[in-house]
Amino acid sequence: MSRPSYYWKLFTYHFTIPLSLFAWRVSFGFWFRFTYDRKIARIEVPFDTDGEEVYEYKSLNKNAIRLLQLEPGAYDDPLRGRLFHADIDKAQQQYMALSYVWGRPDYNHMHLIRIDNGCLQVWDNLNTALRTLRSEHRTVTLWVDALCINQNDVVERGEQVQLMTKIYTGATGVYSWIGDATPASTVGMEILSYLLGDGPFDDGAPWYRRPASEVAEGLDDIIGRVYFQRIWIVQEAAVGRRVTLQVGHLSITWEAADTRRFLARIKLLEISPLWTAPASESPAVDFRALRELLEQSSTAGVRKTGRAVAPTLLDIVHTMRHMHSTDLRDKIFGMIGLAAPADVAGFVPDYTMSWEVTYKKFYEHAYAAALRNPDQTLEEHAKEGPNSPEVPSEVV
């Protein structure tokens, strides 16, 4: 590879003839220039296989992908597996897809995985993920971009990227590996697990039982990780039929059908006057990264129905939650006129209720909407009445 270097111009001369009749100009010129090509050294990525033969990829057929069969073993055992080709349509629901951060390569701490009669290098984060997800008793079939795509073949990489959405939607589920656990991870995962469930937002909730600083540190330890800043998570975890968010050996799992309820409970928590109290009394936590992931997942699910879904009253109240109001009840009542009539059926302003009762009623209303069949329109829901589906007791 070479690059031209320009040292000097001996001389340059040019002149211009105006063609005013047509509003054009014609320029003539000539020049002499001395150049010379300087060779650029090619950057080679170090590949230390400890004397092992490097695995050689075989070309993929059209509409084909590679899958990794990860052999069983204990955490500290050497990584072993085999790669095989599969038609993407026939391989549906036969593998798990791994979503993770590549991270910056540290060539002094590369790891090896033996593939058939050769081996490949893996970066530190992927090495940890594979060891954590590996079973001690059975083979695990995975799709892992760093191994299942020949990274040295730019044509193949482009073709496989076009299949990414199909790869992740076709998987049995998606492992969202966000890295090793820290001492704060347990609290963060405990709170997310509670939000994923249907426990009441009362004094028994984990964020009320722990100091605000501990809650904030735990949630930030999970949601604040670089994983949630990756653009590819929208096309990976967001389209998964089943998502397992894993940090170290801690994990929570939700099905696609759970997404709307999970998202609704996060929004309900964020608009709660108790959660949004002064900083000295409540944790400063930004759920935005997780919310955006769940929003995209929910949108992807609705898109399959071919129906446009208007923002719910909860969506509107949540979006406007930072607006000021003298009366806490007005943060809800003031938004009713912006929602579709069918969505607010059965929920009317009532200032005889305290703000605590108002929010409890709103939680029940929003929770019922989150449980509603996503294929059902608001108009169809309104015909069934405001009490359908039934809301579990003590939602809040």
Image (tube, helix red, strand yellow):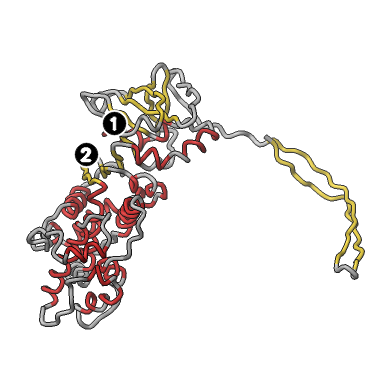
> In x, y percent, where is residue 78?
31, 23
Residue at x 36% of width, y 54% of height: 306
Dot 2 or dot 1: first in sequence order is 1
The reply to whether discs 2 and 1 touch (Cβ–Cβ < 8 Å) is no
Q: Counting other residues with Cα less than 10 Å from the Cα at mark 2, is it few (<14), some (14-19), or many (20 or more)?
A: few
Disc ID at residue 249: 2
Q: Is residue 207 left or right of residue 64?
A: left
Q: Counting other residues with Cα less than 10 Å from the Cα at mark 1, is it few (<14), some (14-19), or many (20 or more)?
A: some
> In x, y percent, where is residue 380?
24, 62
* Residue identifier under label 1: 131
Q: How many marks?
A: 2
Q: Is residue 235 left or right of residue 132?
A: right
Instruction: Give residue 14's quadrant in the image.
Output: bottom right
> In x, y percent, where is residue 71?
29, 23
**Can you see residue 224?**
no
Q: Nearer the viewer, residue 278 or 344?
A: 344
Distance between the alpha carbons at the discs numbered 2 and 1: 11 Å
Q: What residue type is disc 1 on?
A: Arg
Where disc 1 sits, the SS reads: helix
Q: What residue type is disc 2 on?
A: His
**Can you see residue 287?**
yes
